[in-house]
Image: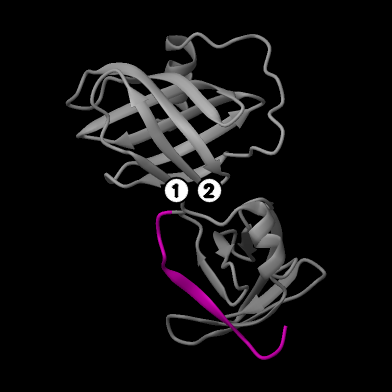
Amino acid sequence: MKRHLMLVAAVFLSVPTTMFPQQGIDLTGFWQDNAGGKYEIRQIGNQLFWLDDARPRYVNVFHGTITANTIHGTWADLPGGRTNHTGSLDLRVESNDRLTKTASTVYFGGTVFTRTQASTSERSRVQPATIFGNWETAKGGTPITIKPDGTFTGAGSSGHWREFNSKDGVYELTWANGSVDRVRLSEDGQHLEDSNPFSNRVIATRVGTR
């Protein structure tokens, strides 16, 4: 469904054919605002797109152009929610983890937007390069050993792991029975969390030395 909405957004909004790189700005990721909105943002060069899906209340998309530290664009509500509004929106890029609203033609609830995950530079400073090591599950304390060779053992079974999304620290564990778990390595490298960026649920905790 979300892929369908993004396709609708691409058709609905006029997208320039040329997308220029924007030096030092990287806003792709998961965000939230101070009014409860939760955004999936994609930056391509100097073009910014987002999806804010809060159905059944509303669902909206945005397309904007980044110029220096300013984003100017248009948002619109899509079918599936109870609202049917559209307007222009100006944002200021304060950092790769924070945006603030500077102007809007109609009411838009959020005024401060913050990334729900650490920036790439922050993650590289505080977390280990991989998830291999010894872990215990939060539910039941079952030991799991994740090995550098791409395999893991635990809970009377075994499997293979791979890096699924290096930017956001997400890993995929495939068990011998074919089931798949996706987990996110915490910023301090001590926890495996639910890969859903809006969930803080801890799946396992590191034990022993790294």
| SS class, disc 1 | strand
Disc 1 marks a residue whose amino acid type is Thr
Q: Is residue 165 above or below residue 126?
A: above
Check the picture and name the quadrant holding the N terminus: top left
Label 1 environment density (alpha carbons within 10 Å; few <14, some 14–19, many ≥20): some
Q: Is residue 124 above or below residue 108?
A: below
The image quadrant that residue 54 belongs to is: top left
Q: Which residue is drawn at the image coordinates 52% and 55% (left, top)?
A: 117
Of callouts 2 and 1, the N-terminal one? 2
Residue 102 drawn in magenta: no
**Residue 97 badge:** 2
The image quadrant that residue 172 belongs to is: bottom right
**Does 142 sit left or right of 200 as displayed?**
right
Q: Are marks 2 and 1 in contact (CB under 8 Å)?
A: yes
Q: Is residue 131 above or below residue 110?
A: below
Label 2 environment density (alpha carbons within 10 Å; few <14, some 14–19, many ≥20): many
Could you tell me how far apart the alpha carbons at marks 2 and 1 are, in whole angstroms? 6 Å
Q: x, y percentage for residue 18?
A: 68, 12
Q: Which residue is drawn at the image coordinates 53% and 85% (left, top)?
A: 142
Stretch of the chain drawn in magenta? 198-210
**Residue 114 badge:** 1
Disc 2 marks a residue whose amino acid type is Asp
| SS class, disc 2 | loop
Q: How many marks?
A: 2
Q: x, y percentage for residue 121?
A: 69, 55
Check the picture and name the quadrant holding the C terminus: bottom right
